[in-house]
Amino acid sequence: MTRDNQPGIFCLEGEWDDDLTSRLSVRPVLELLDQLGVAQWIHRDVATISEFGYYLSKWVSDEYEDFPVLWLAMHGDSAAISMSDDEDGSLTMDELEQMLAGACAGKVIYFASCSTLKEDPKRLQQFAKRTGARAVIGYRKNVLWSEAASFEMLLLQELVTRVKSNGIFKRLQEDHPVLAKRLGLVVATKNEVYRTSLRTSKALP
């Protein structure tokens, strides 16, 4: 398979730290997936809603239809994501739903953020239905960076190679049950929400 024929991941990454000398980034995961011939990728840093909205409009355009997986790597909270500590750096799920309404047919949205999918299942189904997304993936617990990075290699390979969302969830839960439970894995579609059971964790936001 040539690089141009590989499925694509479109990653928007927020600021993890106020220290601008910090080199913490999910980019090495993307580079490894590329080197392994799993996926091609686009990566952009975002710190404000205007930056986020600009790249989001690029992702849903026909120009980038070969990048069906949107990876939102940033801080989060219940039904929210945060690109930075700036006042113009946070979005609720309601606001994101409005931005993506009807624009995500056949696409997958992956929230790599703490607790963003800690929501009522019906609300998650509504988000998938109104955006048109094939699946909405994320966590309902606070996550450790090291655990999330390990799991993301496995998760992203599933997202770019498999079609059925219930199959993705079942495979990850059966093959990697410890990580799936620690992170509180959630896979939501317009018809169903698949969630791992929760268990005690010492992770920090």
Image (spheres, rainbow, N blue to C red):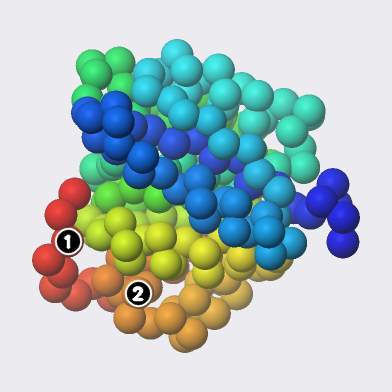
Rate crowding at label 1 as few (under 14), some (14 to 19) or many (20 or more) other CA atoms within 10 Å: some
Residue 85's disc is: none
- Residue 113 is situated, as x and y percent measured from the top left of the image, at 34, 47
Rate crowding at label 2 as few (under 14), some (14 to 19) or many (20 or more) other CA atoms within 10 Å: some
- Residue 112 is situated, as x and y percent measured from the top left of the image, at 40, 50
Left-right relation of 125 to 47: right
Image point (27%, 51%), residue name: 115
Quadrant the N terminus occupies:
bottom right
Task: Measure the alpha-carbon separation of dots 2 and 1.
Answer: 12 Å
Single out the residue that lies furthest toward the front.
21
**Which of 142/93 is in front?**
142
Counting labels gives 2
Image point (17%, 61%), residue name: 203
Mark 2: secondary structure: helix
Where is mark 2, residue-wise? 179
Single out the residue that lies furthest toward the bottom.
174
Is residue 82 among what the camera can see?
Answer: no
Residue 203's disc is: 1
For marks 2 and 1, the one nearer the N-term is: 2
Is residue 99 among what the camera can see?
Answer: yes
Q: Is residue 196 above or below residue 157?
A: below
Q: Is residue 62 above or below residue 122?
A: above
Left-right relation of 12 to 199: right
Q: Is residue 151 above or below residue 83?
A: below
Mark 1: secondary structure: loop
Amino acid type at circle 2 is Leu
- Residue 17 is situated, as x and y percent measured from the top left of the image, at 25, 35
Q: Are marks 2 and 1 in contact (CB under 8 Å)?
A: no
Image point (15%, 54%), residue name: 204
Image quarter for residue 96?
top left
Amino acid type at circle 1 is Ala
**Which of 165/43 is in front?**
43
